[in-house]
Every structure is written in C-alpha cells, then in structure tokens.
Image (spheres, rainbow, N blue to C red):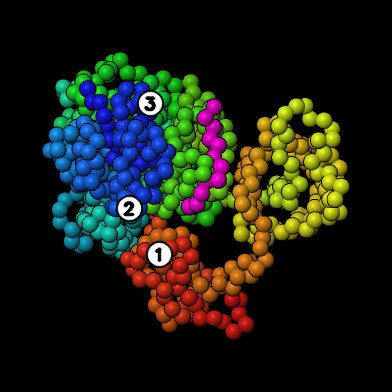
Amino acid sequence: MIRKILIANRGEIACRIIRSCRKMGISTVAVHSDADCSALFVEMADEAISLGGTTASESYLRGEAILAAARATGADAIHPGYGFLSENPDFAEAVTQAGLIFIGPPATAIRAMGLKDAAKAAMEKAGVPVVPGYHGAAQDPDLLLAEARSIGFPVLIKARAGGGGKGMRKVEEEAGFRAALESAAREAKASFGDSACLIEKYVSHPRHIEIQVFADGHGNVVHLFERDCSLQRRHQKVIEEAPAPGMPEDMREAMGEAAVRAARAIGYCGAGTVEFIADASDGLRMDRFWFMEMNTRLQVEHPVTEAITGVDLVEWQVRVASGEKLPKTQEALAIDGWAFEARLYAEDAERGFLPAIGRIEHLDLPEDCARIDSGVRGGDEITPFYDPMIAKIIVHGETRAEALGRLTAALSKVRVAGTTTNAGFLTRLSRQEDFVAGNPDTGLIARHLDDLAKPEPLAPEMAVLAAIELSGLLQPVRAQGPVDPWSACDGFRLWSPARLHVTLAHRGEPLAIVLQPGLQGQAEARVAGAPLHLGWRRLADGTVALTRDGRTVPVTVIRHGRAVTLHGDGASYSFEIVDPLQRADACETGGNRLVAPMPGLIKRVLAAAGQAVSSGEAVVVMEAMKMELTLSAPRDGIIAAIGVAEGEQVREGAVLAELLAVEGGDG
Ligand code: ADP
Ligand code: ADP
Ligand code: MG
C-alpha cells in the first residue's frame, strides 16, 4: 500500500486529494509556487516543498523539480490532479522510471488519447461510434474545405492537440471556412505548439454527456454512469449533473458499454472520462451519441458521480495505483438520487466574464446545505497566475427537482466580498426554465446570455444601507443579551447631523444619496432623487434586518476598506465611497488611454500608431487567467502610441495604447 503521496497540483483539487489521503491514513506532500506559499493546500499537507516561481511553467509544470521533491521527501507516489502535468505522458513515464507510482493511467494510454485525431481513429477501430468527420494527417486548406463540404455544414474545426475549448471554431457555411481554419490553427499553434486540425460534423441540439470509467491492473473495467455537462460557456463547463436528464435506460447501457470498450482498447488503468456528444433534437436516442475525446485523469466534475454512487473516486485511484482490484463490480454499482455541481469563479459575468483578481475579503460558503470543494479561505488572494476558481458547490437530492432546489438555495447563500463572483449568474442559470425542465444543451447559455448575465437592478434600500454603514451609523453587533429598545436605536445619535450627503460608486457609476437618520433605526432617504423610508435593526447573528414598505429581509453587511458588500434578498451589491479627485482622473484617462484591466500576456496588437480607430474596435488582445480579453478603443480617434508589444507580460494598469487628445472633445 502507498504510504506517502506527493500532490503535483494546487488549489481545490490538492485539498480534495489530501482529504481522501487523511481518511486512508496516507501522508501527503504538497509542492507549491511562491504565489501559493500560504495557500490552504500547503497548510493542509503534512509537508510542503517550494518550487519557487509564480507562473505554471515556473512551478507546477516543472516535472524534474517535482520528482526531486518526491525523492527528497520519500514519497512513493505522485497524484497529478487535473490540468498541469496530469495528461503529460512524458511526466507519467518519468515518474515510473524514477521508481515511483504515477496515480493515473500508463503513459501509453495517455498517448493513445492525447491527440484527438489518433484517438478517434483508435476508437473507430474499437467499434466505438465517433463524430462523423475528417481526422486525417493532410492539412492542406483546400483539402480540408472539400472534406467540410462532404461532411456538410455546419462543421466544427478542432485542434487535434486541443483542450479547454481552445482552437475550436464552429463554421456555419462555406464562406467563413478558410478564415476560421486559419484562426483555429493559429490559436492551436500558440497554445499547444501544434497547428493540425480535424473537422467534425457540428451535431445539432448538442448535449455533452460523459461516462466515468474505472479500470484496475487486473483486467477489470467498470463505468460509474454518466454526467451531463451541457451547460457550457465557450466550451467550458459551468454546471454539471448526474445522471443525465431524460436518459433512456438502453442508451445509458449502450454508452457505458462503449466507454468500457474504449478504456479496454487502450489498456487503461485508473480513473478516466469518455466524453460523448449526443444529438438531442429528438430527445436522447441510443443511436445518436458519438465519441469526442477521452480525458485520462480525474475530472473537475467528479464529485457529482461520487454523490450518486457513494464512491470516493480519489480513494479508488489510490487503491488501484497500489495494485488492488476495483472495490466494486459493475453489478454492485447503482445510481442513487441526483446531483449537481456549480463552479463558483471570481469573474464578472456582467462584464463579459472578465476574471476578477484581488483579495477575498470575506468568504462564507453554504457548507450547511452543500458539499463545498474549495482551495481558498477568506483573506486569500485570487492571483492572475492560475484559474480563478473559488469553489465547487455540490448538492444531492432524491429527485432532480429536489437536488436543483438545493442548488439554487445553496447558490443564493454564497457570500463573498472583495472580489466579484459568478454567483448571481449561476443562481439565474439554476432557475432557467429549459434547464429546470431537464432540457439543457451546449448552446443554452449563449442563447440566454443577456438574461443570465444581466446586472442585478439596483435596490435603492441596499444603497441606503450601504451609505448608513459607510457613514458609521450602523453599530457593530452587541456582544450579548436581549436587545433593549434603547440599544436598538442604531440610527440615533445626539450629534447626528440632520442630513448627510453621500456619493457612492455602484458598478462604476456615481450614486447620490441623501440620508436623514431618525430615531430607532429609521431613516428618510433620497437615492438619485427618489425618496424612500426605511428601518434597520442589527440582529444577534450579525445580519441586519432591513425594512422597507413593511417588508423585512435579512442582509449581510460586509465592510472592507472603502467599500461595502451587501448580500440579501437573493442578490449581492457592492458600493464604494467615491473620492472626487480619483474620479476626475479616471474620466480623463478613460477617454484617451487603453489600460490593462489586470496583469496578463499581450497576445496580439491589432492597431499601429497613426491609425484611425472607431469606438469599440479591437486594439489589443491579451491573455489573463486562461482567458482571452479583447481590449477595444474607448472612442473614435487616432492612435497616438502603442505601449506594448506582442508577447509582453504587462501589469494591471499598464497603458496599452493612447489616443490623440481631442481639442475640447470628450477626453
Ligand atoms: P474537466 O474536463 O475536468 O471538466 P475543464 O473542462 O473545466 O475540466 O478544464 C479544461 C481544461 O483546463 C482541462 O484540460 C483541465 O485539465 C484544465 N484545467 C481545469 N482546471 C484547471 C486548474 N485549476 N489548473 C490547471 N488546469 C486546469
Ligand atoms: P476539449 O478538449 O477542449 O474539451 P472537446 O472535443 O471535448 O474539446 O469539445 C468541447 C466541447 O465542444 C464539447 O463539450 C461540446 O460542447 C462542444 N463540441 C465538441 N464537438 C462537437 C460537435 N461535433 N458538435 C457540437 N458540439 C461539439
Ligand atoms: Mg472535452
């Protein structure tokens, strides 16, 4: 049996692996970058070794340094988690050659599935249905176009070395094919060092349904049913569930059997996922699913499978890697109830899902009603170096409706301050009617994006409560005892000014509030001129009971620096005290300068000095936190100077481009 495991990963998945190791009495070694030196996973591990550096290539991708750490600490196995080195066959081989156990499949199996074209060829041979298309070696654009024509539009161009939705382009008709191929190949070359592409039929009404498989070193292979990951944004999963809604039993069996066949065909061992695409234009049908790719690792969304099968997949990985047989046979596995997982990210859905960085000033996740897999704590920093995931929120119920109800409830209890999250977006998505009805498809989010990502309308009473807090009128929680009428008079001050004028910034816009505190936690106020009356009372649990027009709701008020974040009535709002000088400055520079919203890498510079640009025209493409950001001209004008070059790493606030100032213009 393995006694000590080195975890070659970070964040939530490192924490997740440590939890199973603790349960099994196995000691753990963390490796970490400088940016992660005080991270939760480092604290949770029994030992931690610094790799130095900040970016992935300076740290978690350094196979040699990780092997040295394993040797130095006497670890007998390495768990790669997901991402980073998990699907790197050379690393798997190096681990084995060093006399250590790689907790994952053999390098040969990783290689067999590493390139999508070779994988599809192998699966065809094994009798697994694959998506109709071209996956040959020739890459001449004319030939690929001819193939696309014979497949029939729409088609999907995919990088054969692709992953994470990169190098993928949907092409509706012949006219757009060449340009799409060129840009897919360019992105593939830049991301994977390989520009080769394959062409697939674009499946109509697509649903992403994947099968969890597990194999041991004794010839046993089972599947642990399906997960539906159709809710995606830009080919990235957002909410996953198990089982798949509307799945006929014969199709489930056929998919499970095909996935097991796929695993056997490549001599698989350990945990893996076979991803299929299904055509759901006529419901789910057993002759309408096709192999897309196999992920030869533990998947981000593995917890939904754990929830419906009762299996600890990490424990199974460790047992199988130790040489044990699979703990259960296919017959002993069954589906119990329904589960969902939502990925909580530090990103701003209302601003094009821009990744948000910064300190998580306050973090309160619904541990009482959901399984929370997280790698961060309140006070931690979301850095630009890695994926901005805050947590995975996993719920289980007897029926789909019950589990989904729990998901919505759990999401609405997420309380984060200091950084923007996608919680509001996820909450709205969990209530979206097609999804609720059990009809997800991979285009659902894009079709309903305007509704799902729309800004929460400002509730004026929340703005007033923020002004009350920021003016120091909201007293801290009292230590004990029943509240007597006098101590409840939070708004009452003998020296209270008759009237307060406060300007707050809400989503970058100024909001003028006039506040006239009265007795007993009452106030008259005007928000942007509109009058309202409200009452408030601090409750024993620290929340504030906020009353407007006879309706009272509990609100969590979190003060952080010059800002305050309120969570209540099913939404979150953040306000900041406006510094008049800073605003003037922001206005001035906003007109003439294009500034990096966060640290990142400059991918492309699309304009040159002297060039005329119109408002909204793309000027610079940068990459930050696994995402491409297009930065556009703030107004019509002429580029005075470009401040960066392609390939350059920039800091937040760096001036990317400057426009010629306009005489008396809107600058
Ligand atoms: P999965 O297929 O397991 O759901 P995703 O589709 O979310 O994973 O991830 C897309 C790609 O990004 C995968 O190749 C995955 O390995 C990688 N990835 C996901 N999360 C991380 C992370 N935290 N760090 C590094 N790589 C990651
Ligand atoms: P990656 O390696 O980036 O995960 P995949 O091949 O797994 O690439 O595809 C990612 C997503 O793209 C799928 O989950 C699905 O939403 C969509 N997709 C892939 N192939 C097709 C297809 N042939 N037709 C329609 N959608 C597809
Ligand atoms: Mg995939």
In the displayed structure image, the side of residue 350 where residue 79 appears, left or right: left
Q: What type is the residue that disc 2 sits on?
A: Gly
**Residue drawn at (71%, 32%), measured in percent from left and top?**
479
Identify the residue under disc 2: 53
Residue at 77% x, 27% y is 482
Between the C-alphas of marks 2 and 3, the distance is 35 Å
- Quarter of the picture containing the C terminus is bottom right
Residue at 58% across, 35% down: 413
Q: CB under 8 Å between callouts 1 and 3?
A: no
In the image: residue 289, left or right of residue 527 = left
Chain part drawn in magenta:
357-368
Q: Quadrant of the N terminus?
A: top left
Q: Residue at x 74, y 51 (%)?
A: 471
Q: CA distance from mark 1 to mark 3?
A: 41 Å
Name which of mark 1 and mark 3 comes first in the sequence.
Answer: 3
| Label annotation for residue 170 | none
Question: Label 3's element?
Answer: helix
Q: Is residue 138 above or below residue 487?
A: below
